[in-house]
Amino acid sequence: MNINLLRLCLPFTLLILVASCQKNTIEEPGEEVPETNLVADYDHSVIWEWNELFARIDKDALGYRPCPGPRALAYMGLSAYEIAVPGMPTFNSLKTQWGTDLKIPDFQVGQNIHWPTAINSSYAFLMKKFFFKTNFVQGFGHISNAEAQKMIATLETGLETKFKAEINDLVLFNDSKAWGEKVATAIWNWAITDAYGHESDLNPLSNDPTKGDAFYYNWRAKSMVDGKVVPGRWQPTNDNPDGGMFPYGGRMRTFVTNDAQKLCPPPLAYSESKTSPFYAQALEVYSLSNPDMRYEDRWVSEFWSDDIFGQTFSPPTRVIAILDQVLVIEKANLEKAVESVAKLGLGLNDYGVACWHSKYVYNVERPETYIKRLIDPNWEPILVNTVSGVQGITPSFPAYPSGHSTFGGGAGVLLADLFGQNYEFTDLCHKDRTEFLGIPRTFNSFEDAGYENALSRVTLGVHFRMDCVAGVALGQAISRRVLKLPWKK
């Protein structure tokens, strides 16, 4: 070939090769890495808006606490993550982690997506589904199911209007909305295959009696012999006479927890001896939780309670409320928000399932019944239902381990991983409340907050210390497994 012709062709040949290599890199399976339009280019507001609405609805959603709420948060967070992960270059999809029944559609490489629009459509689709049949607290100041559905639709259309104006491209908007709904539909179709979890909020006291399992879900058979209560076994208190909530909660689907991992170590051996460790634990509750208790102890107890339907959001949703405060403080981008709701959602779900599994296996009685039987028949826990006026409440399920402790202890690990081990923050969740002591409290770390959340149950009078210690350990173990998922490339 003429040397001058070779010199002329060489640049064009190199250009073709470079273009070919770039094309192959972009289209390589699993390499869905966009050069522009990253999820991190957007702010966290779409996640924040839906989190805040969930907390508002969760307050009045009967049967949603404590197990169905975290379950819904898990699927919504996972959906947001799988929608956004093609625009998060350092993250992996998790869609193959749970077998072939989860059929998340493949992302079309090169497709342009407005990520906030896609995420908005997912939250709207799933929240409508999760609350479709839910019963709600009735009366002034509470919302009905119809009002909840209207709130969901209003937020959806409001954000759509905002995003349409921002992108000014109807094709892009429609493509983005369709992508979000495709993933959300796949997530929902998988969620409803969880026979114990799907619509469990509709019957929280039996949670589907057709699946009777005498091994540990029939608490009556374990608590009563010849019509008499077995000492040390859980029984409903007079303020919650209808039975145990979510006896099948431990059968719901988990994401990172197998059957063996759902069971925490056994509690202290039951004893009525005044020199026994068990009696000492009851005496601690009795001495700390009473009308003359320290102001600080009452403040901590009421600050973390979140026990009452119609008054505040539930304890698991409290974690999301704290997350929302941090997202605002940090001016977090959408990638951080998506990562946060995905990790916390999976963790919250498994905290609830594992904790309720252990509760009904061990079936440990609450301090209220032990103290009244052996120490002081007139003693009452300080937990008050300010909605109904009932005094001295004990939650209607077994004591060991503590749910608050599992949720709070576990979430402390995940939030620390997301935002730092020594992250100082002030929790404003109940600022300006008048029904209880909700004055903001400041913490040196998320784990410190988790420990305080846990031990608040002792001073509230509803848990033994062993319940709280076991709950924190159970939640932290689950969080470590969440963090071991292949999130990053």
Image: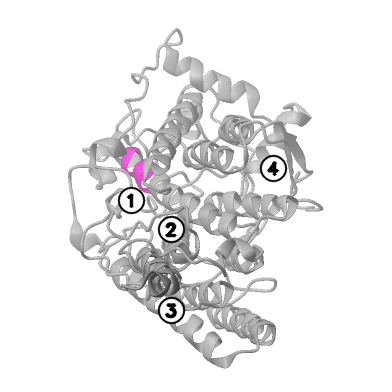
Residue 466 percent location from the top left of the image: 46, 24
Q: What secondary structure is found at the residue carrying circle 4?
A: helix
Start-end of magenta stretch: 353-358
Three-letter code for the amino acid on which mark 4 is drawn: Phe
Dots 2 and 4: beta carbons under 8 Å?
no
Three-letter code for the amino acid on which mark 1 is drawn: Phe
Q: Quadrant of residue 267?
A: top left
Q: Earlier in the sequence, mark 4 or mark 3?
A: 3
Q: Earlier in the sequence, mark 2 or mark 4?
A: 2
Give the side of residue 463 with respect to residue 350, left or right. right
Assess whether residue 357 is covered by the magenta stretch: yes
| Gap between marks 1 and 4 measured at Cα | 30 Å
Closer-to-camera residue (326/60): 326
Q: Nearer the viewer, mark 1 or mark 3?
A: 3
Give the residue number, with chain letter if any, for mark 2: 74
Dots 1 and 4: beta carbons under 8 Å?
no
Dots 4 and 3: beta carbons under 8 Å?
no
Q: Earlier in the sequence, mark 2 or mark 3?
A: 2
Three-letter code for the amino acid on which mark 2 is drawn: Ala
